[in-house]
Amino acid sequence: MHISVAGKQIALSDALKHRVSAHLDRISEKYFGQAMEARVTFSRARSFFTCDINLHATRGLTLRGEGEAADAHSAFDDAAEHIASRLRRYHRKATKHGHQKARQQVPEVGRGYILRPGMPALSPSEDDVTSEDEDSALPATGPYATIIAEHPTEIPTLSVSEAVMRLDLADSQIQLFRNSKTETINVLYRRPDGNIGWLDPSLRPN
């Protein structure tokens, strides 16, 4: 597994880098046989250190953990424990899912967009002036009216329980997937109250 360990404006010791690599290798071997890659980033905020771990286990399965502590070693331990606690929750399912999905066909790919806030409304004399980079599919004024980036977005075919697992392991806010039972596009999202919301357009009212 390729492991990248970096610090944002802080120097990292070789001992810390070795400890991080050895620990993540053990997690990879225990649950997935061999993960694909991991990125670990350390930074410092005021009097404490932070650590962000992103481990790409298999295609489409990402684990994320964040930690903070008075020193970099303890911050890594905190972030690694967040990942470990989620893996313990999904022990058998994560292992089975990782091996099965790695052998399945490539998922659908859609387009993801990043929008930025729009410019203030133009004065009447400027209404017919159109910017060259303005997207005709979006309003000329108003909030988030300009596309500034786009990127491919995978749409995997999953059961609802598999999608919940992916959302939780990656500690993400949203999971877009094709429901393997209904074959429709579904969305899971993390609600402000901590619960998970599920949108399924295939369910019709009686």
Image: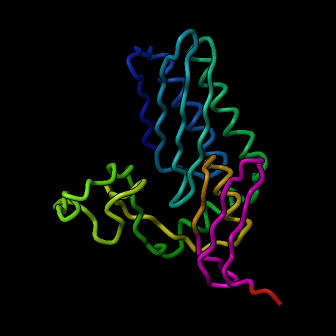
Please tell me whether residue 149 is drawn above or below residue 136 in the rendered image: above
Is residue 53 shown in magenta?
A: no
Image coloring type: rainbow
Provide the residue span drawn in magenta. Answer: 177-203
Tell me residue 57's x, y (percent). 55, 51
User: Along the horizontal axis of the image, is 133 left or right of 106?
Assistant: left
User: Along the horizontal axis of the image, is 97 left or right of 136?
Assistant: right
User: Along the horizontal axis of the image, is 93 left or right of 172?
Assistant: right
Is residue 197 shown in magenta?
A: yes
Please tell me whether residue 24 is drawn above or below residue 183 in the rendered image: above
Tell me residue 43's x, y (percent). 48, 21
Between 35 and 38, the one lying in front of the other is 38
The residue lying at 68 percent from left, 53 percent from top is 190
Which quarter of the rendered picture does the C terminus lie within?
A: bottom right
Q: Quadrant of residue 181?
A: bottom right
Tell me residue 17's x, y (percent). 47, 23
Q: Quadrant of residue 53?
A: top right
Tell me residue 47's x, y (percent). 57, 9
Return the residue found at the far top.
47
Please tell me whether residue 114 is drawn above or below residue 178 in the rendered image: above
